[in-house]
Image (cartoon, grey):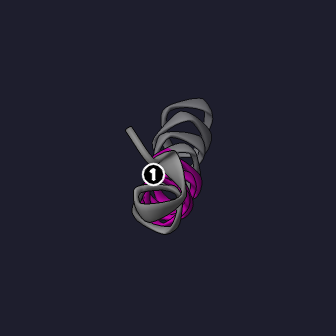
Amino acid sequence: MNLAIFTPFIKEGLDNHNEWEKKFYAEAEKLRNQSKA
């Protein structure tokens, strides 16, 4: 099996996941700050 074909898709998937994670943590941080205030 040739992994080189799939590598760009895997990389793109990881990039998308990292973007999602950043948004998720930013939202969680906002909620945490609201509950403190």
Q: Nearer the viewer, residue 26 or 36?
A: 26
- Taking the spot 54% from the left edge, 58% from the top edge, the residue there is 4
Magenta highlight: main SS = helix
Asked if residue 23 is among those painted magenta in the image, a careful observer would answer: yes
Which residue in the structure is indicated by mark 1?
17
Q: Nearer the viewer, residue 29 or 8?
A: 8
Height in image: 5 above or below 33?
A: below
Check disc 1 and report its element: helix, strand or loop.
Answer: helix
| Residue 10 at x, y percent in the picture | 46, 53
Considering the image in quadrants, where does the N terminus appear?
top left
Total marks shown come to 1
Q: Nearer the viewer, residue 3 or 11?
A: 3
Asked if residue 11 is among those painted magenta in the image, a careful observer would answer: yes
- Taking the spot 49% from the left edge, 40% from the top edge, the residue there is 28
Height in image: 31 above or below 5?
A: above
Q: Nearer the viewer, residue 1 or 27?
A: 1
- Taking the spot 46% from the left edge, 42% from the top edge, the residue there is 31
| Residue 29 at x, y percent in the picture | 60, 43
Q: Name the amino acid type tagged 1.
A: His
Give the residue at the far front of this rendering.
1
- Taking the spot 49% from the left edge, 46% from the top edge, the residue there is 3
The region drawn magenta spans 10-24
| Residue 18 at x, y percent in the picture | 57, 53
